Amino acid sequence: MRRPFGLGLRSQLMLALIVAFGGAFVLLSLVTARLDESENARERQTRAAGLAHALAAGTGDAGDGLSDQVVGRMLQEGLVERVEIHTLGGMQRSWGVVDGNPDVTVATATGVELRVWVPASYGADAARLNLSLFYLGLTASTVLLLTYVLLTYFIVRPIDRLRRASERLAAGRLHANVPVQGAAEVARLAASFNEMAALLREDRAALQDRLGDLERATAELTNAQEQLVRSARLAAVGRLSAGVAHEIGNPLAAIRGLLDLMQSGDLDPEEEKDFVGRIQREAERIHHTIADLLDFSRTAPARDGTLETSADLSEVVNDTVKLIDRQTRFHDIDIALHLDDELPRVRGDHERLRQLLLNLLFNAADALDGKGRIEVQATSGAGVVQLIVEDDGPGINREIIEQVFDPFVTTKPPGQGTGLGLAVCHTIVDGLGGSIEAANREEGGAAFEVRLPVAT
């Protein structure tokens, strides 16, 4: 929802000008009215004085020289409103009816005093005032119209073009340019906008190039990590193969012995049937051993889909322990499992998680040198499943405990370790959005704590 911005620049300026012109119009009207009133008073006095002197000339020495017809005609024509003649004995004669003080009083040489009231020329004054106000309003309207046109052409339209171009620029259309027009300040603003748009286009092109380089580097890094995981997986297969050879050798020797006895022909049918059953069981034992090895050595799914898959951690732990329980190096190692009931599924695929746990178990077995105790614990809470692998061996060398997950960091003699097992564990856990930490136990031995996100 677009936020309201109020009146535009043109509307605000026009409103300010209208208020200013309106105030000036009122003030000028009052001043004009006062000036007209003052001018009217002076004109009225002048007219009254002229009429009074003219009438005074015909009043006579006793004030009885004025003719009623002359004064009456002046009253009818509106030249005067009232005329009074005063002598020392008081008012002698009067014409017209009006209250108030006379406009002018004239005394003759004989002591006769003539008082004259003349009408005000309101019609002419009102017409003159209206004409003045008309021309004043016309001038104000012309100025406002001219101001509106100039504002529109020199300021409002260029700024409006800038606004539309800015909106296009904000929408990602970086090829938005505006013509350099209008007032000098607006034109400079348009030129600056065009320069900014050009710089943004250059920056976007550079950013896209860098993004392409980053994507290629990310793809190469992902491939390198996948190669590292595959290499460590093959190494784990090799280590498993040594134990598998022993596991296959014993059943094969038993099968060969049983077959030799059967070929001698000295067996009765019941013994032959028993030997066939034993051969079948030994063959099944070999089959399961090889199947477990092939299942583990199978290529893991691509990493891109790892975050969308989930696995049962309890099943992963049980399958991994089953895979190694026949290994020679684990014959004298007690593996204890402490798994919470109904653990939630965790993010990741079964094979990667089994490789993670297998690397941790191999690492613990190497630290125990074939004899000791390994505990595997799994608990859940706060959206994560916590997997802990502990051993009661000598622990981790304090000098390398901070770098234990770095590639090629190992304390094993040359030829007995590559230093990639824990690095692969860190790569797998980091790819799943989890974390892994290593620490030494107070009672002795090492502990690796893995936190895996619960699958959603």
Image: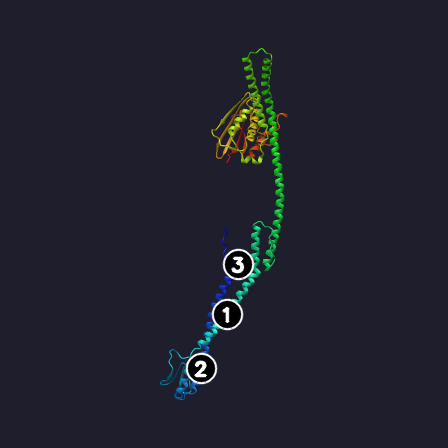
Dot 2 or dot 1: first in sequence order is: 2
Query: Measuring 58% from the left and 18% from the top, which residue is drawn there?
Result: 251
Q: Is residue 94 left or right of residue 21?
A: left
Amino acid type for the residue under numbered disc 2 = Ala
Q: Mark number for residue 49?
A: 2
CB contact under 8 Å: marks 1 and 3: no
Residue 74 coordinates in the image, percent (x, y): 42, 83
Amino acid type for the residue under numbered disc 3 = Leu
Vertical placement of 156 versus 314: above or below? below
Residue 294 coordinates in the image, percent (x, y): 59, 26
Query: Measuring 53% from the left and 65% from the top, which residue is drawn there?
Result: 145
Residue lying farthest to the left in this orientation = 89
Q: Which residue is mark 1?
A: 136
- Judged by depth in the image, the label closer to the viewer, 3 or 2, is 3
Question: How far apart, in angstroms, are the residues tagged by discs 1 and 3?
Answer: 26 Å
SS state under label 1: helix
Q: Nearer the viewer, residue 272 or 36?
A: 272
